Amino acid sequence: MIVVIEKTVNFRRGMFVAAIRSNERICDEHYRLRMALPEFPPSRPGQFIQLQCRPVSEQPGARELFWPAGQWLRLSQSELADREPMLRRPISIAGRRDLHPGHGGGPVELEIIYRTIGAGTRWLAGAKEGQELSVMGPLGNGFAIRPRKPQAVLVGGGVGIPPMLYLAGELARAGKKVYAFSGVRSVNLLPLKLICCGTVSREGRPAACVEEFARCGAGAAVATDDGSLGYEGFVSNAFRDWVLETKPWMDDLAVYSCGPEAMMKAVADVCLAEGIDCQLAMERHMACGVGTCQSCVVKIRDSGQRGWSFKLCCSDGPVFDARDVLW
C-alpha cells in the first residue's frame, strides 16, 4: 500500500542575514539561539534551515590554485587546511514569531535549539548578541496537521525535541489537544524548562510539568535512559505504555515524532500495530539541504517493480508517513 501524505512543502526559500538576539546555554551541551530577520518566507513545523557557522563578513571567495605536476597540492585556505566549518549545518526550526502578523511579510524572529557536537556548533556556541549569521531556508516538507484528528501526540528524542516545540504551538492554534513525550539520556541533557520536578510523572503520564509545552496547553512526559528524571527508560516505551494504558480513540489521534532512528522505528511500530496515523521527521547528514548532493537518502516504499526507492531527506522529507519508511 502506498500512502500519500498531505504535502506542506513551501517552494519559497532564500538566503537571509540574521542578527543574533540571544544565544544562551540551557543545559549541558545545548543552546537556545534567537535570530531576527527582516523577512523570512512562510514556514511549517518540521522544516529546517541551513546555517553557516562562521561570520557573514568572512564568507570565503573562490580563488585559483596552481597544482604543479607530480607534486602534492599545498592547501592554505583555512576552510580546507584547518578545522574550520565549510558546510552549512541543517538545524530544525524550534519556533517562529512574526513581529507584524497579518501584514503579508515583515520582520521575523526564529528560534533554534542546537547541541554542541563538532567544530561548527562549537563556533556557534561562542557567537554573541548582535552578530550576523547567514541563513538559508525554510527547507524541506513540514508536518501535516490533520483537520479530522482532534488529538495529537508528539514524541521527541534528544535533538528531535526542538521541532516538537514549534509543532505544539501550531497544533494548539488549530484547536488540537496535545500530549508531548520527550526523551533524553539524562536530566542534564534536557533542553526544556521544568515547572516543578515533582510534577514529572515516573509512570510517563503527561502533566503540566514543562514550561514550553504548558504554554500551549499541552501535557508533557519526560523519559530519561538513566532514570534521573521522570520515566526510566526509552521515551518510545513511555509512549507505548501510555497508548496501551489509556487506549485513546485511535481514529482521533495523530502522532508526530523526531529523534534517533531506533526511537522513531519503535514509535512507528506502535502506531502501525494500533492503526494510528504517524508522521516522522527523519534525520540524515546533509551537505547542501536542497537535493543537489544526493547524500541524504531514505528508503521509501513505492509501487515500482522493486517495491521501494530512495527519497531525499532534505527535499522529499524530512517528514514522511511512517507507513512508507523501510527501515
Image (cartoon, grey):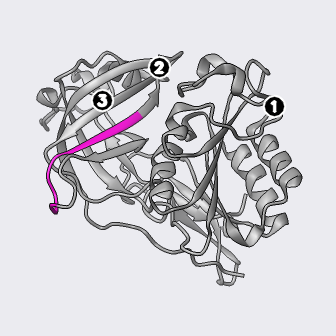
Closest to the observer, 58 or 38: 38
Q: Is residue 106 magenta?
A: yes
Highlighted magenta segment, given as a residue range = 103-112
Which numbered mark, 2 or 3, is in the foreground of this view?
A: 2
- Rendered location of residue 268, percent (x, y): 74, 57
Say which residue label 2 marks.
Answer: 26
Amino acid type indicated by mark 1 = Gly
- Which residue is at the front of the view, 50 or 220? 220
Residue ID at (63%, 31%): 209
Q: Residue furthest right?
A: 245
**Of callouts 3 and 1, the N-terminal one:** 3
Q: Quadrant of residue 14?
A: bottom left
Reading the chain from its start, which is encountered first: label 2 or label 3? 2
Mark 2: few/some/many CA within 10 Å (<14, 14-19, 20+): some
* Residue at mark 1: 233
Q: Of marks 2 and 1, which one's residue comes earlier in the chain?
A: 2
Nearest the camera: 284 or 219? 219
Cα gap from disc 2 to disc 1, whole angstroms: 23 Å
Relative vertical location of residue 6 with respect to residue 23 in this rendering, above or below: below
- Expressed as whole percent of the image width and height from the top left, the position of residue 136 reads 27, 48
Q: Quadrant of the N terminus?
A: bottom right
Q: What kind of element bears circle 3?
A: loop
Location of mark 3 (residue): 53
**Residue 52: image location, x then y, percent:** 28, 35
Circle 1 residues within 10 Å: few <14, some 14–19, many ≥20: some
Query: Mark 2 is on which residue type?
Result: Ile
- Whether residue 289 appears in this view of the structure is yes
